[in-house]
């Protein structure tokens, strides 16, 4: 059920009026619905129940400790890609054995931290990384569970080139045909328990079909490895499940599961374990970015709404030309959108370019967007902003990163305060001659 709805002409998150939150916390501010996060996790778990997967939420998506804590309490583990994300997951109380660590460029220090905590799986992405990890584990006098990230050479459906990771020539993972050699090498390294296969095709993937193709290749590999004396305990299918940036755009969990579960059922029946790493499918539609119109101006033939959120807060439109639906929190004339789609054009609406305050020509949240008539000071909600929004926010132009608020029913709490000027310079050392 959608937890961002119009009531009495004003957009609410669960039972909380977003106008009130904007007054209380200022703008730009990210607002998350706790119920949406929990529901997405529960729906996924129910749809894939036959596989009883370990759901490792991709921390990179939205990494606020409070969200991680909520998801961890709901049974989720974590997929991390840096020592920083490992730190976040552990700090949020996610048990180490439920953490998996991917990434093509892990440092020695990051591997040492992972091994010291004895995390669930290190997802190794190259032969050189395997050797480094073996050394780290031997020096630590421990053992470590390891998976190999395989590049299955499968293109996601509707996945942009910039966010594709599982096709030939990509920097991610090990080419399928070299994986058997990696296992043979690992057999000489008793400190490593190499018993997992990991794939992640990219993101977002708007069909279950690429998962089926990739997992079929992974299962063929699993059979060959088993025959060669390398039994596989875990298959990790990665993330990439789509989100509804437009109404009804993404396949539902049941649709993904109907295609994927039968492929993996025999592996699970034979005692294998399945891991999933969803990120945006959990968080994107659980969050909006609240921003206020600062100025309206004409620019040649165009009308530009300058808002207080820019690419520094939500970079997806500037970086990928990604579409984010947006609408006024209290639309003029009570024009409530019947759905959230790119070509929504209602009578009485007007076309705007929605631009941020950053000194970059690409700093737009939307171009030629049909919206109810805007006034200066109006509040806009940018939807689908819970994933890769705050997590990719920067301080470019020495701007202050937004606040984050978590809504639960009719209550809300600040889970990250807005940056301050002090935050901007806190890591910089004193000027010559004394303190700044
Ligand atoms: C290894 C890995 N797992 C999971 C994810 C999460 O992807 P998504 O947010 O599309 O589910 C990513 C990011 O694309 C990733 O790189
Ligand atoms: N950050 C991207 C996708 C890449 C995910 C990380 N592998 C997005 O905003 O959609």
Image (spheres, helix red, strand yellow):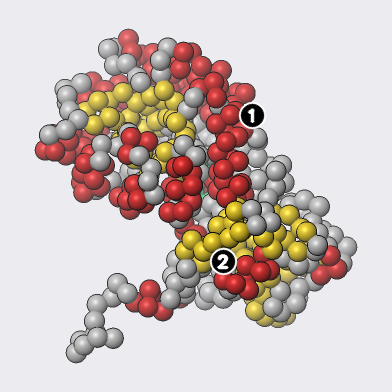
Q: Which residue is mark 1?
A: 254
- Look at 52% across and 34% down and name the residue there: 155
Q: Position of residue 339 (x, y in %)?
A: 77, 51
Q: Is 321 on the left or on the right of 61, as rendered?
A: right
- Look at 47% across and 28% down and name the residue there: 53
Q: In the displayed structure, would residue 416 be above or below residue 82?
A: below
Q: Is residue 314 visible?
A: no
Q: Position of residue 269 (x, y in %)?
A: 46, 13
For disc 1, does the CB lie below 8 Å from ligand 1? no
Quarter of the image containing the C terminus? bottom left
Q: Are marks 1 and 2 in contact (CB under 8 Å)?
A: no
Q: Position of residue 78 (x, y in %)?
A: 41, 41
- Look at 69% across and 56% down and name the residue there: 15
Q: CA distance from mark 1 to mark 2?
A: 33 Å
Q: Nearer the viewer, residue 315 or 156?
A: 315
For the residue labelled by badge 1, is the local secondary structure a helix, a strand or a loop?
A: helix
Crowding at dot 2, Cα within 10 Å, few <14 / some 14-19 / many 20+, comes out as: many
Q: Is residue 428 visible?
A: yes
């Amino acid at each position: 059920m959608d937890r961002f709805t119009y009531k009495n002409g004003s957009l609410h998150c669960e039972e909380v009026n977003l106008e009130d939150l904007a007054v209380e916390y200022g703008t730009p501010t990210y607002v998350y619905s706790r119920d949406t996060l929990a529901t997405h996790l529960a729906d996924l778990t129910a749809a894939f129940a036959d596989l009883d997967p370990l759901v490792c939420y991709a921390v990179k998506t939205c990494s606020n400790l409070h969200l991680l804590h909520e998801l961890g309490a709901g049974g989720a583990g974590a997929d991390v890609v840096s020592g920083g994300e490992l730190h976040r997951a552990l700090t949020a109380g996610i048990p180490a054995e439920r953490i998996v660590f991917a990434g093509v460029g892990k440092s020695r220090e990051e591997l040492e931290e992972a091994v010291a905590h004895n995390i669930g799986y290190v997802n190794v992405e190259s032969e050189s990384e395997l050797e480094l990890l073996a050394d780290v584990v031997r020096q630590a006098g421990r053992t470590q569970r390891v998976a190999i990230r395989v590049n299955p050479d499968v293109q996601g459906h509707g996945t942009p080139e910039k966010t594709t990771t599982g096709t030939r020539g990509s920097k991610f993972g090990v080419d399928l045909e070299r994986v058997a050699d990696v296992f043979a090498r690992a057999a000489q390294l008793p400190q490593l328990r190499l018993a997992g296969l990991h794939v992640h095709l990219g993101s977002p993937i708007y069909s279950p079909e690429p998962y089926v193709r990739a997992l079929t290749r992974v299962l063929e590999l699993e059979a060959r490895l088993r025959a060669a004396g390398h039994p596989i305990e875990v298959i990790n299918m990665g993330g990439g499940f789509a989100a509804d940036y437009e109404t009804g755009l993404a396949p539902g969990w049941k649709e993904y599961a109907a295609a994927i579960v039968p492929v993996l059922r025999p592996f699970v029946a034979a005692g294998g374990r399945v891991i999933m790493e969803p990120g945006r499918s959990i968080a994107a539609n659980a969050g909006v970015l609240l921003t206020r119109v600062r100025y309206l101006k004409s620019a040649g033939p165009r009308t530009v709404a300058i808002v207080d959120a820019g690419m520094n807060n939500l970079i997806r439109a500037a970086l990928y030309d990604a579409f984010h639906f947006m609408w006024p929190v209290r639309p003029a004339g009570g024009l409530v959108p019947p759905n959230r789609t790119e070509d929504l054009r209602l009578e009485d609406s007007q076309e705007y370019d929605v631009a941020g305050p950053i000194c970059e020509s690409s700093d737009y949240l939307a171009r030629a967007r049909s919206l109810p008539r805007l006034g200066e000071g109006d509040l806009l909600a940018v939807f689908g902003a819970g994933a890769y929004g705050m997590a990719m926010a920067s301080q470019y132009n020495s701007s202050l990163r937004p606040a984050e608020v978590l809504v639960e029913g009719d209550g809300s709490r600040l889970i990250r305060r807005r940056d301050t000027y002090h935050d901007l310079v806190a890591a910089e050392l004193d000027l010559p001659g004394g303190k700044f």
